[in-house]
Image (tube, grey):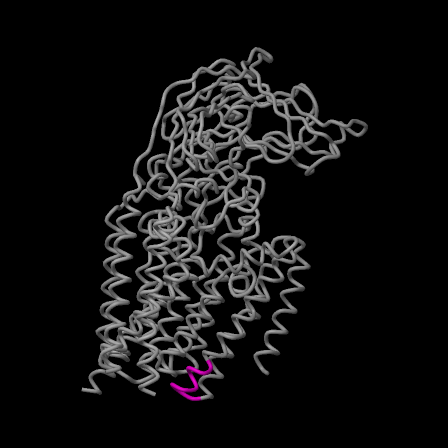
Amino acid sequence: MLINKLKLVFISGLLLTLVSTATFTVDVFSFPYGETEYYSGVIEMEYGKESSLILPELKPSDRVFISLHTTASVDLMISTGSNVIATAPFEIEGRPHVFVDYLVVTKRYLFIAEEAGDYALYFTPSTPKTPYSLVKSGDLNITISQTTFNGHKMLNVTLSSFKNMGERFPKIFLIYPVSVTVKEDFEVSGFIGLLKGGVGMVTIDIVDETDYAFYSYLILEFFVKEGTLRFFEVNATSEEMFGYGNISGDDISFICIGMALDKSHFAFENENIVYASVLLGDLNISNGGKLVKVDAEAHNVFSVPYEVYMFAKYRPSYYVYVLQSFTVIGLIMVGAVFFTRGKRKR
Amino acid sequence: MVLLTYSVILTTICIIEILKADGFCGWSLYPYFDYVSRVHATPFIDFRSGYPPAGLIPYYLLFQFSDGVASFQLYFTLVNVGALALSMFFIYLVLSSAYSKANAMKSIVIIASLPFIAMLSLYSHGWYKTLYGVYVLHSVEPLSLLFMTVGLYCMIVRRSPILTGLFIGLGFMTKIYPILLLIPAIALFRSRSDALELLYATFASTFIISLPFLILDPFMYATVFLHHALRGPSNTIYALIEGFYGHTGLLHPAFDQFLYHWQFVKAYIPRTNDHAFYLWKKPSLPIVLFIGQATALIACYLLLRKHSNSRTFVKGSCLTILSFVFFSKLYSPHFAAFILPIVVISLDKFIHKLLFGVSLYVMHEIQGLIWSRNFYDLRFPLFTSEVIIRSSAILIVIALLSYELIKGSSNAN
C-alpha cells in the first residue's frame, strides 16, 4: 500500500516538474531574445563642440550599445527629458585600460534605460582626429593640435597636470594599430621634440603578441631641453629600456608613442602645474620592403561612422514565479520519495 | 588538531603577506567586485559573472562585508584556508578507507606543504607565487575543491548516491569541473534506483542554487556558461597549434558583460588576439577537442562500470578529470588546486606522488618566469617548454591510471 502511495507521489512529482519546466521553457523562449534594433550612419563632429543623436523610444531595462569608429576621443552625455544618464565606466574587470584594439580603435559606450522614453545622445570630441587613438593613465589634461616646427609638419601634444595631485608619472599613449610579422628590415622612425615644459620620458612602445610583451624604447629623456628636435629610429634588434627587445619574426599589434610627465621634474620646482608640449612628426613604419607613413595631422572637423544597438532585457512575469514554484514542489515530492525509501532500506 | 595547527600557521603567514603587500596580493576579485558594486549591478541578472553562483556569491558577500582591500583579502584567505584544511580532512578519510592511514598521511603532507613551498618562489610578490596564490590568496578553487572532496568521500566511503549528487551539484555551481565526478559516480551507483537518486540530487542541488537567476533572467544565466564554453585556447598544446601565446585573462571591458552572449556577438567582431572573444584560426580544433573530451568521458565510464573497489574509483575519478583537462583548450595555473590533490591521491607509490608534486611546482615556477618582465626574450621558449612538459606529465598519469584500470578489469575477469 505504502509502495503504491510512494509511486503515486513520485510519478506526480516527476510529472509536475517536467510539465512546469517545459511550460517555463516555452514561456522564456517566447521572449524575443534574438531581436536587436540596429541603427548606423555617419555623424559630423567638431572638436570641442556638441553633436547629437536622438534615439527611438526605449523600453525599460533596454541596453543601448554605441560604437563610434574614430580615433578621436569623444565624451558622451545621455539625457532623457531633463535627466542625465550615466554610461557604464570604461574599465576592464577593474583595470583602467589594456591595449586591445577594440578598446582603442572603436569607441564604445553602454547605458541602461531604467525607464521607457525618448533618449538623446550628445557627443563632444575632447581631441581632434589624428591617426592615433589615445589612452590616458593618471590625472592629466591633454590638448592636441597640428603645427609646423623647423619646416616639419608636426603634432603638438600638450600634457598638463597639477603637481600635488595624483600619481607622480601620469602618462598617455598615442596608439597606432598594426598587424604585421616583424621582418629583418623592420623600422619605426620619425622626428620627436620638446617644444615647451619638461617631460618625464617619451617612448616608442611595441605590443608584441608572440612574446606577449610590451617593449618600450626611449626616444626622449628627462633632461631634454625646450626646443629640442631629434630623429629617432627603432628597428627589429634595437635594445629597449630594460635591455630586451629582439622582436624579429614576432607578430606585433600596436605601435604606441608613450608620453609621461614627472611631477618632480626640476623645471617646475616652484610651480603648481607641470606640463610638456611634445612635438611628433610623421611616423614611418617600414617592414618587408613596404613603407607605411603615419601623417602628423590633426583634423578639428571630421565624420564619424556610428552604430547603435538596442538590446532587449528579459523581465520575468508573475507566471514564471508560479511555474518555478511548481517545479520546486515537484522536486520536493520526488525527493521525499527517495528519502522515505532510503529510511525504509536502513 | 594537526589540520587546525596547519590552518593557523597558513592563515598567519597569509596575514603577514597581505599586510606586506599593502594592497592587492596579485590578481584579486576585489577590483571586479568594486566595479560591479559601483555601477549597482547584480551578478547573473544584470551581468554575466566569471564564476557560477556558489563560486561567486560567498566571496561577493565577503566584499560587501569588508571595508577595503586588506580586510577583503583577510576574509577571503580565512575562507580559503578553512576550505583547504577541510578538503585535506576529507581526502584523509577517503584515503584511509581506500588505502591506509599511512598512505593518507603521506598524500596530505605533499598537498598541504605545497602552499608553503610555493612561498619560497624566486619572486616575492604578485601572482608569480602562483601555487601559493591559487591555494590561498586569490582564487575560488579551494571552495570547489572542498565540495569535490566531500563528494568523493560520500561516493567512496559513505556510498550514498543522494549525498554524492548533492555535493557534485554544489561543486558544479562553484567552479564547474566537479561535475566530472558524475561519470565515476554513475559507474559506481549502477542500480536504477541509486542512479536515479544520484541524478536527482545533482539536478536538484544545481536547480535550487540556480533558481533565483533562472527566474529573474535565464538568458543572462545561460550567458555565464556559454561565454566560458566559447573562450579561446590558452596555455595548452592546442594554444601552441593555434598560435595564441597569451594567458586566460578576460581582457574585456566589464560593461560588455551586461549583454547576452548572442547580443554581444552582433556588436563585436571576434579577434585572434582576444581570448575572451576568440576567432579560431583553425575552426575545427575546438570541435575536435570537444569530441576528444566526450570520448574520454565515455571511455572512463566504460572502464569503471564493472568495478566496485574503492581504490579503482579514486583512480577513476582522477582519470576522468585528467582526461577532460588533457583535451581542454585552456589551462590556468588555478587548475593546480584540484589537479594536484586528485593526482596525488590516485597514485599508489609515494615517490610517484612526490614526483608529480615537484614537477607541478617546477612548472608553476616556469609560469612565474614566463610572466615576469625579466624574461621577455626567453618567454616563448619557456612558454612552449612548460606547456609541453605539463601536458606530457598529465598524459603519463593518464596512461598509468588507464593501464592500472585495464589491468584491474582483466584480473577481475
Q: Magenta span covers which residues?
A: B92-100
- The residue depicted at 59 percent of the width and 76 percent of the height is B6
Q: Is A5 left or right of A213, judged from the image as shown?
A: left
Quadrant holding the C terminus of chain A: bottom left
Q: Is residue A18 above or below residue A125?
A: below
**Along the line of sight, which residue is nearer the eye, A44 or B357?**
A44
- Place of residue B318 in the rendered image (x, y in percent of width and height, measured from the top left): 35, 73
**Along the line of sight, which residue is nearer the eye, A240 or B24?**
B24
Q: Is residue B99 magenta?
A: yes
- The residue depicted at 47 percent of the width and 50 percent of the height is B43
- Place of residue A241 in the rendered image (x, y in percent of width and height, measured from the top left): 58, 40
Q: Residue furthest left?
A: B413
Q: Is A22 left or right of B334, judged from the image as shown?
A: left
- The residue depicted at 26 percent of the width and 82 percent of the height is A2
- Place of residue A28 in the rendered image (x, y in percent of width and height, measured from the top left): 31, 47
Quadrant holding the N terminus of chain A: bottom left
**Along the line of sight, which residue is nearer the eye, A68 or B218?**
B218
Q: Quadrant of residue B398?
A: bottom left
Q: Is residue A137 magenta?
A: no
Q: Residue furthest front?
A: A1
Q: Is B317 left or right of A297, judged from the image as shown?
A: left
- Place of residue B187 in the rendered image (x, y in percent of width and height, measured from the top left): 26, 76
Q: Is A114 left or right of A220, judged from the image as shown?
A: left
Q: What is the chief secondary structure element of the magenta stretch?
A: helix
- The residue depicted at 48 percent of the width and 82 percent of the height is B106
